[in-house]
Image (cartoon, rainbow, N blue to C red):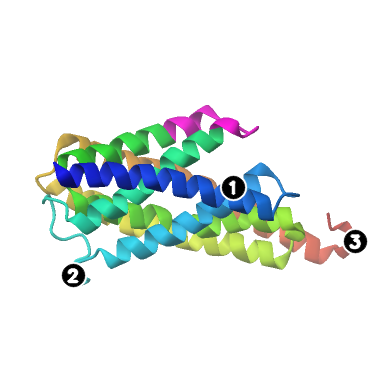
Amino acid sequence: MGEEYDIVNLIALGVISWTTVFLLVRKIFSDRSFELCNRIVSTIHGILAVILASLSVEDWSCPVCPLASASTPKQRQVLAVTVAYLIYDLICCLFDVKFTLDNTVHHLVSIVGLAAGLAFQLCGSEQVAALFITEISSPFLHARELLKEFGYRDTDLNLAADVLFAVIFSVARMVGGPYLTFVTLTANNPLLIKAMAVGLQLVSVFWFYKIVKMVKYKLTKRRKQVGMPGKLD
């Protein structure tokens, strides 16, 4: 019971901490948009989540082992940090002028899924592995948009960020993702965890398709710009 209170306290402290970081970033970049400041916080979370997830791995010869087992205190702490971030980001999105329903649903589903794992103290290895897979490309996703706002739209640097994001996303979601889905489905995991694994992979396939189209469009556009320098945006 005491450990459960510790996790709840960690989540509460995390929400306050992420909010404080946002307010500091907002103060530093007071002349920039609300979205840019939130993306900077999201980038920090993505990097931190990957580091913490990596540090929680017990055996790198089998990063998702032990399967279908009780989560370790370190795994629960990693998940709690991300739950706190998701709660902060959900609240933050409500104040953003670009509020979208699908983003809100995504946050709610993620919070419920991770919170369920924390409550039942199960499947820590699978959930931390999923966190690593989903967040490894996150800093590069946000870097694309940050570069645009800092004036690097339609530049080689922005194109490099697009391609790097696409490559990392594709490897993580279309190589690591199917493997994680397979081992999660074949292990003796609760139905909710298996459903989340399948859902995550389906979403990954959908975004992979959209990202391939985006990269194809960007490369085609860049070739046209190089061929006609007078037509640069």
What is the magenta segment's predominant secondary structure? helix
Q: Range of the magenta residues?
A: 94-106
Q: CA distance from mark 2 to mark 1?
A: 38 Å
Q: Quadrant of the N terminus?
A: top left
> Which residue is labeled 2 in the image?
59
Residue beneath disc 1: 23
Q: Residues under labels 3 and 1: Cα distance? A: 42 Å
Dot 2 or dot 3: first in sequence order is: 2
Residue occupying the far right of the picture: 230
139 with respect to 124 (left or right): right
Graded by Cα atoms within 10 Å as few (under 14), some (14 to 19) or many (20 or more), the crowding at tag 3 reads: few
Going 43% across and 43% down the picture, which residue do you hit? 15
Residue 67 picture quarter: bottom left
Sequence-wise first label, 3 or 1: 1
Characterize the local packing of mark 2: few (<14), some (14-19) or many (20 or more) Cα atoms within 10 angstroms.
Answer: few
Query: Nearer the viewer's eye, disc 2 or disc 3?
Result: 2
Report the residue at 32% width, 48% height from top: 10
Residue 56 image offset from top left, x and y in percent: 25, 63
- Judging by the rendered image, the residue that carries numbered circle 3 is 230
Look at the numbered disc 2 and give the secondary structure of its residue: loop
Residue 142 picture quarter: bottom right
Amino acid type, callout 2: Asp
Q: Quadrant of the C terminus?
A: bottom right
Nearest the eye: 154 or 4: 4
Q: Are marks 2 and 3 in contact (CB under 8 Å)?
A: no
